[in-house]
Image (spheres, coloured by chain):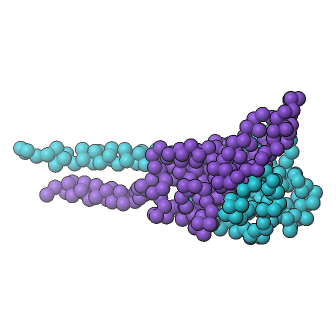
Chain colours: A cyan, B purple
Amino acid sequence: MENKHVHETNPKRTFITVLIFIAIIVVGLLTIRSPKLKYALSPQQTVELVTQEDDVMYPYELEDILSGVNDTVILIDIRDVFEFGRGHIEGAENIAAITLLNEDHIKRLEQLKDNGMTVVIYGNDQLQANGPWMVFRQLGFDNVKVLLGGYDFYKQWEGMLGDTYYEDSYLLGGPSFDYAEVAASAANVDNTEAGETLKPVTVTRKKKAKVAEGGC
Amino acid sequence: MNRNYIILAILFLILASGLLLLPERENYKQISPGELMRDVVQNTRYLTTDQVAQMIIEGDPTLELVDVRNEGDYFEYSLPRAINVPLDSILAEDYIGYFGIEDMNVVFFSNDDIKADQAWVIAKRMGYKSIYVMKGGLNCWIKTIIQPQSPAETASKEEFELYDFRKGASMYFTGAEISAPASDGEQAVTVKRKKKSSVAEGGC
């Protein structure tokens, strides 16, 4: 009996030790913190997403949504309650950008996705909705689109959205100037008529764009 | 040999094989979707063209201008000292070294601000700090810095000061002569009215 290890003398004890060990591991695995929200797209996939420029809704498409012809689209206004109260696209829901990832709203979006609904988010302009749209797409909500032109463009053309089919001032991404030429010929700042140096240019978007009037 | 030892050894080997299932460790620290959304909805990332012009003129050594347009556009015209990282290759190995440099303030710009903003969101997710977007992009740069428009006679003093800055900046960036400003007469007008706080002239 000398020098015999405790496990060799008492098999039950071994069994209990192993059991406790496994129990600790199982508890550890169960309580491991898994983040509620996970990226569905890798960074590289996100780069491909933004270079494709597919998930957009053109303002003229709103016509069918507002008239009820297209009832598979939910509009979500991501501006704050104050701005929403001042005016919004008819039938739009208001979910302020800062609350978009609240549990309730995520559940609602998941529901909409399961029901095959398209979610179009908009802010005052396309830029405001761009970030939230990218986050949603990275989370795997591939039914989320962004409204080109945003609320500002809608407001400007309210009631005649169908006429915006040939309008392209809301398209972003292209140059409004021939930069090299303008920079070279900017000799006369005060007398330069803006119109003279503006040139119709082709943007990399789907349509040809004229020079965007108005702000940047 | 005791049977118990064999069983224990096999058990731990099985458990150890679980390590193979652990996710691969990434060499950058991505931020969580929640953090990303929180940062995305704030507007603190936008710098005006005036701010950027000021930094270039002052020769700010921490300024790292990143042109996210394609190579052809970049070589045709870009901002002084800007580097070119096309949006579609922002994560490519050739370019990744441009980001995450300590103390550098990265400012993305494109034709307007959409592409630059998209580059910003991706860089933000990758955990890079001190990154910004030039609001309005090059279109706004031309409108405000290269071809500044004289404010209305009734404009506030600040607007005239801004215009003076832009005239100077325009000369700095184009080497152009500026024709005699017609503003001498305007400054003689002494009537000062409180103006409605309209959007600053020429702002983007």
Q: Is residue B186 left or right of residue A137?
A: right
Q: Is residue A87 left or right of residue A14?
A: right
Residue at the right extreme of this rendering: A159
Residue beneath the point at 19% across and 47% down? A7
The image quarter in which residue A203 lies: bottom right
| Above or below, B196 relative to A61 | above
Residue B177 percent coordinates (x, y): 70, 52
Residue A175 appears in the picture as rendered:
no
The image quarter in which residue B193 lies: top right
The image quarter in which residue A68 lies: bottom right
Residue beneath the point at 61% across and 60% down? B78
Residue at the front extreme of this rendering: B180
In the image shown, does A48 or A17 lie closer to the viewer?
A: A48
| Above or below, B161 relative to A29 | above
Residue B84 percent coordinates (x, y): 55, 61
Residue beneath the point at 14% across and 46% down? A5
Residue A82 percent coordinates (x, y): 80, 38
In the image shown, does A189 or A95 lie closer to the viewer?
A: A189
In the image shown, does A26 or A73 lie closer to the viewer?
A: A73
Q: How many marks?
A: 0
Residue beneath the point at 58% across and 47% down? B56
Residue A172 appears in the picture as rendered:
yes
Which image quadrant: the N terminus of chain A?
top left
Residue B145 percent coordinates (x, y): 70, 50
